[in-house]
Image (spheres, helix red, strand yellow):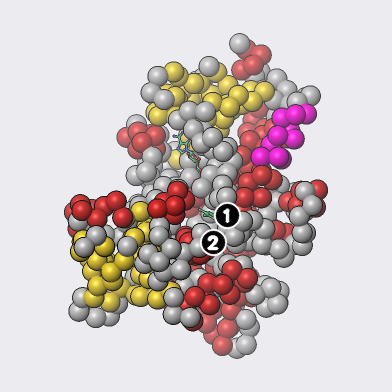
Amino acid sequence: MAYDVAVVGAGFSAIAVTINLLKQLPCDCSIAVIGDDPGFGRGTAYRSEFYIHRLNVPAGRMSVLPEEPNNFLEWLEKKGRSVSPELFASRNDYGLYLRDTLAGLLRNRNGRARVDFIRRKATGCVTSDADGWRFRIDGTADLLARQVVLCLGVGAARLPVKDDMIDHAIRRRVIESPWRLSWLSRVGRDDSICLLGSGLTMIDQVLALRAQGHRGAIHVLSRRGLLPHPHDLRHGAPQKPELPETREISQILAALRKQVRSGVAWRSVMDGLRPITQSLWQELTDAQKARFLRHAMPWWNVHRHRIDPALYERFIGLVEGGTLINHAGYVQAIDENRGRACIHYRPRGEQSQRTIAADWVVNCTGMERAGIAHSPLLREMRDNEIVSANPLGLGIEVDTQSRVMNNRGEIQPGLFAVGALTASRFWEITAVPDIRVQAKAVADHIAADCAQDGTHIAQAL
Ligand SMILES: Cc1cc2nc3c(=O)[nH]c(=O)nc-3n(C[C@H](O)[C@H](O)[C@H](O)COP(=O)(O)OP(=O)(O)OC[C@H]3O[C@@H](n4cnc5c(N)ncnc54)[C@H](O)[C@@H]3O)c2cc1C
């Protein structure tokens, strides 16, 4: 099997790259999309069946096509859904929108490149030569592609407690991967739950539990006890941040705080940072990036990644009503007592130990920061010196055009990465408004190369 382009992955990044390639590549080109996820394009984010699981970015900023900003709003209108740029649409609808956008291009094949969907896993990257990159599919067949885009996402983060500190007897009540919502069907109406992690994954689980009729107590335990903030669409336009000359993290934070103290809404300051976040990140030294990750990241996350105000109201109602209890501390061990889980933790700033008793423990620590440990393919590519893992655990090294670099800093011709895997270079590259721009830029690059090269694999075969 030989192709001009291979897109490896099956989530938002892969579908965004494929859509852009289809719009640009000539009809004598061929594309392989290699992904083992049956709901192609939905990934973990956009496959939820719960209507209550909404987008955390307003619909007006969720078009998959950066050059057609109203594309998602037009789809919502066509489907008879309520339409407003400020709407927080359901994530399930967003998954359908992505599928329809791709299907529309595939239906109208005239003048378009050929696409083969290979519903399997890329298990290894054997070698590269003048013909391109050779991948192993499910450990057997080889696939050759001149240009490859890695859209592998990041794995789910592990439980925040060492494996040998979890009593074997309680294992079946510890849910490591809450994205598979089937665990909810095992939960009794009055069961008590302990959610480990207090970010957007936690909110998803709380809303899903309540939608299922759960009425029991919910404990939330995280290192700092920080909870997500809501969007406030009345807060006004983004404000240009007043940044100091230096790139020292403490001084940048001090300048931003000063701007907020002077009366600018903090959301406007955060939104003002958005357009320059990637370039600011690229100006930091490795030591400054490390300091940001160590000291500022939890605050960054809660202020930057906000939620639908209506969902926040429901959530905060549970906190105020005492159904949801928020704890800050470090999990030390989980053992069993009379069929229930006892979560032993050290409260933040204390030396004592406390215990939460719950019927279920759920890992809500979210997606992994973007390491490569979750992917055997990436580990093999690293061992073969094709990719280089970022020392701060932010995916793999790429240049500003998303071209993959090896451990000697050399650009790997025809090999790109898209999505959170490229956080080493871009930092903020997890949400649709950022990934869609990157996906288009990579597709533009590939299309220009194909046009320059002239001969295509489909012709050569
Ligand atoms: C619950 C949730 C809600 C979110 N909500 C929003 C939102 O409202 N707005 C927003 O802008 N952003 C949101 N995001 C962030 C962002 O849109 C997603 O993280 C984005 O979908 C990332 O897509 P991805 O393709 O890079 O990764 P993923 O969705 O993780 O997809 C990676 C895919 O690659 C496949 N794969 C991995 N390895 C291989 C291999 N070797 N061979 C073949 N296939 C492989 C996997 O099976 C998977 O399907 C949300 C994220 C999550 C998790």
Q: Residue at x 24, y 66 (%)?
A: 342
- The reply to whether the C-beta atoms of the residues labelled 1 and 2 are less than 8 Å apart is yes
In the rendered image, which quarter contains the C terminus? top right
Say what amino acid the circle numbered 1 marks: Phe
Point out which mark residue 50 bears.
Answer: 1
Gap in angstroms between the C-alphas marked 1 and 2 = 8 Å
Between residue 421 and residue 83, name the one nearer to us: 83
On screen, residue 64 versus residue 167, left or right, reads right
Q: Residue at x 40, y 76 (%)?
A: 325
Say what amino acid the circle numbered 2 marks: Ala
Q: Residue at x 38, y 23 (%)?
A: 139
Between residue 278 and residue 57, name the one nearer to us: 57
On screen, residue 344 versus residue 302, left or right, reads left
Name, please, the residue furthest toward the top.
461
Number of other residues with Cα within 10 Å of mark 2, as a class: few under 14, some 14 to 19, many 20 or more? few
Quadrant of the rendered image containing residue 164: bottom left
Along the polypeptide, which appears first: circle 1 or circle 2?
Answer: 1
On screen, residue 173 versus residue 446, left or right, reads left
Q: Which residues are magenta?
A: 99-108
